[in-house]
């Protein structure tokens, strides 16, 4: 890593940040501009500069509040969208940027969280700064033949604000992460780009996006009802070959348990996070 400088972003870096994002993730200009307008603040992005230009970047967001059983809210930051120029990968530059993000955020939060975009990246983040699982999910892939059924309740689109209120009410008293309206609005934009959205199902809720022939049910919350009935309503509105369904461990749902969000914990945090803490969907 000779001749590499790790530093906060500057205004003149913004066009390069867009280039790196598009190269790393393929998102369109509208989504990147929306993210930047909401979350790109003076102290909320770390970059690596080499050979006179920015070659890697990662963002720091104010993350959800986590509510473990004690009821004391725990503040989080969210390390997001690590992207490195392909010509500079494999040199430890991305790791250095991620470490700098964690170090910066530890001054003001209990935990710095990251949601790896693919299974192979969990080891990377665990090795980089000693992250531990902070949240687990139950997950299953259900073929259409098993997902369809009688529709007892129509799946109706709702706004991010309405979803926020329904979600908060359903999860009250459980260990979970509260996503504010800004986070939900950005995620709803992302879902609509992929043909999905936020849904109300007679009090139960679901967050959905399409991924080719798969409908990804990123969050299905049906504490009192039958999750299969809710999924049948989703399937009626979003025809697909398969349904990848995520549910909290403390509500009914199908599938196996796996780690979801990883967190670097502030050394001053004395409270152990519960194994069934529900993070929900966001930015994976």
Image (cartoon, rainbow, N blue to C red):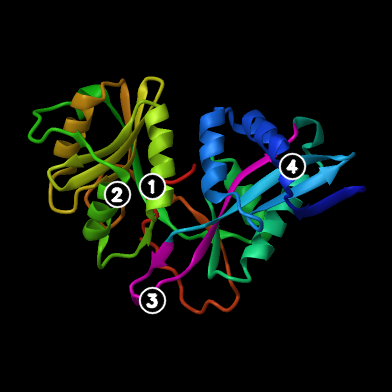
Residue position for label 4: 13
Q: Nearer the viewer, mark 2 or mark 3?
A: 2
Q: CA distance from mark 4 to mark 3?
A: 38 Å
Q: Nearer the viewer, mark 1 or mark 4?
A: 4
**Are there few (<14), some (14-19), or many (20+) residues within 10 Å of tag 4?**
few
Relative depth, front residue between 133 and 52: 52
Residue 27 in view (yes/no): no
Q: Which mark is residue 105?
A: none
Q: Residue at x 69, y 31 (%)?
A: 19
Label 1 or label 4, whichever comes before in sequence order: 4
Residue position for label 2: 161
Label 1 or label 2, whichever comes before in sequence order: 2
Label 2 or label 3, whichever comes before in sequence order: 3
Q: Residue at x 23, y 53 (%)?
A: 166
Position of 88 relative to 161 (above/below): above
Q: Is residue 81 magenta?
A: yes
Q: Secondary structure at mark 3?
A: loop
Q: Is residue 280 magenta?
A: no
11 vs 251, left or right, is: right
Q: CA distance from mark 4 to mark 2?
A: 33 Å
Q: Which residues are magenta?
A: 65-85
Residue position for label 3: 72
Give the quarter of the image for residue 278: bottom left
């Amino acid at each position: 890593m000779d001749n590499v400088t790790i530093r906060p972003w500057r205004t003149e870096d913004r066009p390069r940040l867009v280039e790196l994002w598009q190269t790393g993730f393929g998102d369109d200009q509208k989504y990147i501009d929306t993210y930047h307008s909401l979350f790109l603040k003076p102290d909320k992005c770390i970059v690596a500069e080499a050979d006179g230009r920015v070659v890697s970047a990662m963002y720091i967001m104010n993350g959800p509040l986590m509510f473990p059983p004690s009821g004391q809210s725990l503040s989080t930051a969210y390390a997001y969208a690590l992207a490195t120029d392909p010509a500079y990968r494999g040199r430890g530059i991305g790791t250095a940027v991620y470490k700098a993000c964690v170090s910066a955020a530890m001054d003001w939060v209990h935990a710095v969280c990251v949601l790896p975009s693919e299974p192979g990246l969990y080891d990377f983040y665990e090795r980089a700064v000693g992250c531990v699982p902070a949240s687990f999910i139950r997950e299953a892939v259900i073929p259409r033949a098993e997902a369809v059924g009688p529709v007892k309740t129509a799946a109706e689109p709702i706004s991010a604000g309405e979803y926020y209120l329904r979600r908060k009410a359903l999860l009250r008293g459980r260990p979970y992460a509260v996503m504010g309206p800004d986070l939900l609005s950005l995620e709803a934009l992302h879902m609509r780009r992929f043909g999905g959205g936020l849904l109300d199902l007679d009090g139960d809720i679901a967050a959905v996006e399409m991924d080719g022939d798969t409908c990804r049910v990123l969050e299905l919350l049906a504490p009192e009802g039958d999750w299969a009935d809710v999924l049948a309503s989703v399937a009626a509105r979003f025809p697909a070959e398969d349904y990848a369904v995520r549910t909290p461990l403390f509500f009914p749902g199908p599938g196996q348990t796996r780690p979801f969000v990883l967190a670097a914990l502030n050394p001053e945090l004395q409270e152990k996070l519960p194994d069934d803490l529900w993070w929900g969907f966001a930015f994976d």
